[in-house]
Image: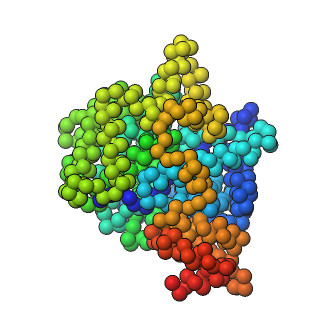
Amino acid sequence: MTVRRVMGVETEYGISVPGSPQANPMVQSGRVVTSYAQDVGLPAARTGWDYEDETPLSDARGWEMARVDADASQLTDEEDPTLANVVLTNGARLYVDHAHPEYSSPEVMSPRDAVRWDRAGELVMREAVRLLSPQQPGVNLYKNNTDGKGASYGTHENYLMSRATPFADIAKNLIPFFVVRQVMCGSGRVGIGAESSRPGFQLAQRSDFFEVEMGLETTLKRPIINTRDEPHAVADRYRRLHVILGDANHCDVANLLKMGTTSLVLGMIEAGAITSDLTLSQPVSTLRDISHDPTLQTPVRLASGRSMTSIELLWAYYEMAAKWLERTYGGTMPDEDTAEVMTRWEQVLTGLESDPMSLHRELDWVAKLKLLRSYADRAGLEWTDPRLRAIDIQWSDVREDKGLFNRMLAGGQVERLVAEEDVLRAVTEPPEDTRAYFRGTCLARFPDRIAAASWDSIIFDVPGERSLQRVPMLEPERGTRAAVGEVLESATDVADLLSRLAVE
């Protein structure tokens, strides 16, 4: 067991037009995608998305929803010619999802790389804002998950795991973990309730918007466990766990723990190493109760009748992981990534247990709460004051000089795990150890010869060929630099590339 597995992060960015609250968000999101794509030489109208393998209505519980019963927002396998969409040279997808510009990171193999390419998306969005700024009033983008007035938009995680693992086991053992992990990786929010109808501060931005334990939807009746069965890989070997519960993180440590601890728990589930039944009595209401309590003292009631705090429940998962690693590897860690996550996990739980505010350099919600309290104390404000809501929104502004998190970062008040120069390279360069390397490098070398792409395919327009040439990429750990780097670098054109790949 290790934290290493195929994973990625999708983030929908909040969008606004200064002085024009009624501006059409779909149109404005299209401007964001198109302006960036054109600036980097990847016209959004040319490089489309290949929808052939999309199956958004397949349910992991063993059935498929009828299209007539689906909400329009669930039909993500239908191309909308009015919306912009582009695949970037770093292997990511930049497109308009509903009413938001979305950056879906390339597939990576470690939580640290997930942090790196997620932050690369922030730089992509920041550049788009800069490009549009001469066209006053421009647009503003926010890496957050709610406008504070009743709207919520997602940050989704994806983890590839074994198809052999029964989905019922995944749901049973993940729901308790997902309900409590927000104390480590919530982004913090001013206002209680989906429409912020009550004053106060809570740990996570998404928790008030979840209504059921399991389900296929992502925008209606949001479930703690999303059951979409769309692997983007060999279907009888892999399942993709699509997580819609999490917040967008700015803090590297919180983001690393979100991805890393979830991957560890999935590893334990795959191996049958969850040794305690931690089934919750009321998961949905408990999710909200925990989020509403920055003191972290809310009791979490288990179906067995036991009661514990969220931190005690997280310690239970940590201790199972530690024992499993000990049994499997005999006291050594399988790799640096796993060692880093386990070390950070223990440090953060210890800090949350003794003094949560001591983690203001590591966790989003703590850093935000510290800033809000400081401002409120100086100005004598109550949680009902709209200025605190304004600070909450401004926290996530992607602009370097306007976003409050970015200003704290520049002031050395937040810990970074990934150097800025590495993130900057990730804006244009793909990960080298997944199929994203092949996808991104093809886009960099032959942008005019790629008719469409997706997570598991590239469609080439080869001169002299009467039909388009589709190359499937159903194995996410193939197409790496080690496997195809030499071929990609030496190919003179796409015909030469496909010819060489055919004999590999």
Foreground residue among 16 and 71 = 16
Q: In screen coordinates, is 384 left or right of 281?
A: right
Foreground residue among 437 and 372 = 437
Q: Residue at x 46, y 49 (%)?
A: 244
Instruction: Name the residue furthest right.
Output: 135
Q: Residue at x 25, y 55 (%)?
A: 332
Q: Residue at x 33, y 38 (%)?
A: 347
From the top left corner, tell me how far across and down residue 372 is, in percent.
Answer: 51, 24
From the top left corner, tell me how far across and down residue 353 is, in percent.
Answer: 30, 31
Camera sees residue 43:
yes
Foreground residue among 482 and 121 = 482
Examine the rendered structure and indicate whether residue 186 appears above or below residue 423. Answer: above
Q: How is the image coloured?
A: rainbow
Q: How many marks?
A: 0
From the top left corner, tell me how far across and down residue 184 is, in percent.
Answer: 39, 38
From the top left corner, tell me how far across and down residue 125 is, in percent.
Answer: 64, 47
Identify the image quadrant of residue 150: top right
Q: Which image quarter holds the N terminus?
A: bottom left
Identify the image quadrant of residue 283: top left
Q: Residue at x 42, y 56 (%)?
A: 110
Q: In screen coordinates, is 229 left or right of 484?
A: left
Instruction: Name the residue furthest top.
Output: 380
